[in-house]
Amino acid sequence: MMNDANEISHHTQLYGFIGEFAGQNSISATLNKLFKAKNKNAMMIPMNIREDDVFFTLSNMKKSHVNGALISSEYVKKTLEVLDERSDVVEFSGLCDIIIRDDKRLIGDVLSSRAIVKFLKDKCAKKIALLGVDARAKAFVFFAKEFDVSYYFDEIEQLMHFCQESGIEGADINRLAEGMDIDLSSYDAVIDFSDFESLAMISKLSAINLDMKHKKEFSALKVRANELEAYYVGFDNMLDVISQATFEFLEDKKHLEHDKSDMKF
C-alpha cells in the first residue's frame, strides 16, 4: 500500500520492504502514513521476493531509484553478502534488517533491535529475560547495555559461549528446558529469540512478552502467553514503533530532506 495520494515525483525517496510475503504485511502502509503526517516526500513499497531472488534484487538496488529497504526476518542473514559497508552492530550480530543506498554502495544496519530497546524503555522495563542465542539475541545485546538481562537457553555450554562471544562479563545464565518449571514473572519483559517449539516449561510469564514474530508465523511464546493469559507482543503489535524507528533512522541518515511541498514532477 502506498500513501493515500499515491504521488511519486522524481524527488520522491523510494524504499522497499523485502520479504517473501511483503504484500501481506502492514509495515509499508504504516510507514507511509507517517511519511504523510510528517509531510515527507518518501514512500515504502512492499516487494514480494523469493529466497532465490534476494541477492539479485539487492544487487540491482545499487543502480536503481530505490534508496534503501527494510528486510523481513526470513532474509536478515542473506543480505550480508551484498553489502558494501556494515555497521558495528551488523558486524557484531551477523544480521542486517535495514539497508540504505549511498550512490552505488549498499550500507547495512540493524533497526529491529533499536525499536525493541526504545519500546522497552518507554514501558520503563529494566529487568529482561532473554531466551535464545541466535543473531537476533546478539543484536539485542548490542543495544541493551542499560538493561539488567538474564540469559536462558536449553544448552548451557552454548549459552556460555554466546555470552563470552558477546563480551558479557558475569552473565546471569539459566537453563530452560523441557520438564522444568520456570517462573519468569519477576522480569519486566521476556524476549524470545529461541527456536523452541514449546515453552510449556514456563509456569509464569512477565508483564511484557515479545518475540517479533509475524502474524502468520508460529510463535511458541504467543501460544504460551495465551495459555497463561499474559500480554504478548509480536511484529504486528510493533508497527507504529518500527515505523517511527525507521523514520528516525532515515532522517538521521539525511534521507528525508524533501517535503511534500517541495514536490516537482
Image: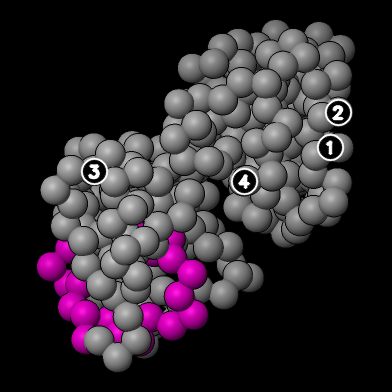
User: SS of the residue at dot 1?
Assistant: helix
Q: Position of residue 241 (x, y in %)?
A: 44, 44
Crowd rating for badge 4 (residues with CA inside 10 Å; few <14, some 14–19, many 20+): many
Please state which of the two labelled residues, at mark 4 or mark 3, is closer to the viewer.
3
Name the kind of residue labelled 4 in the image. Val
Of residue 56 and residue 219, the one placed in the foreground of this image is 56
For the residues labelled 2 and 1, the Cα–Cα distance comes to 5 Å
Which segment did they paint magenta?
181-202
Q: Which mark is residue 43?
A: none
Q: Earlier in the sequence, mark 4 or mark 2?
A: 2
Residue linked to disc 1: 57
Residue linked to disc 3: 168
Name which residue lies at 53% across and 58% down.
236
Residue linked to disc 2: 60
For the residues bearing labels 4 and 3, Cβ distance under 8 angstroms: no
Name the kind of residue labelled 3 in the image. Ile
Residue linked to disc 4: 76
Relative placement, left or right, of 51 versus 70 is right
User: SS of the residue at dot 2?
Assistant: helix
Q: Is residue 155 above or below residue 6?
A: below
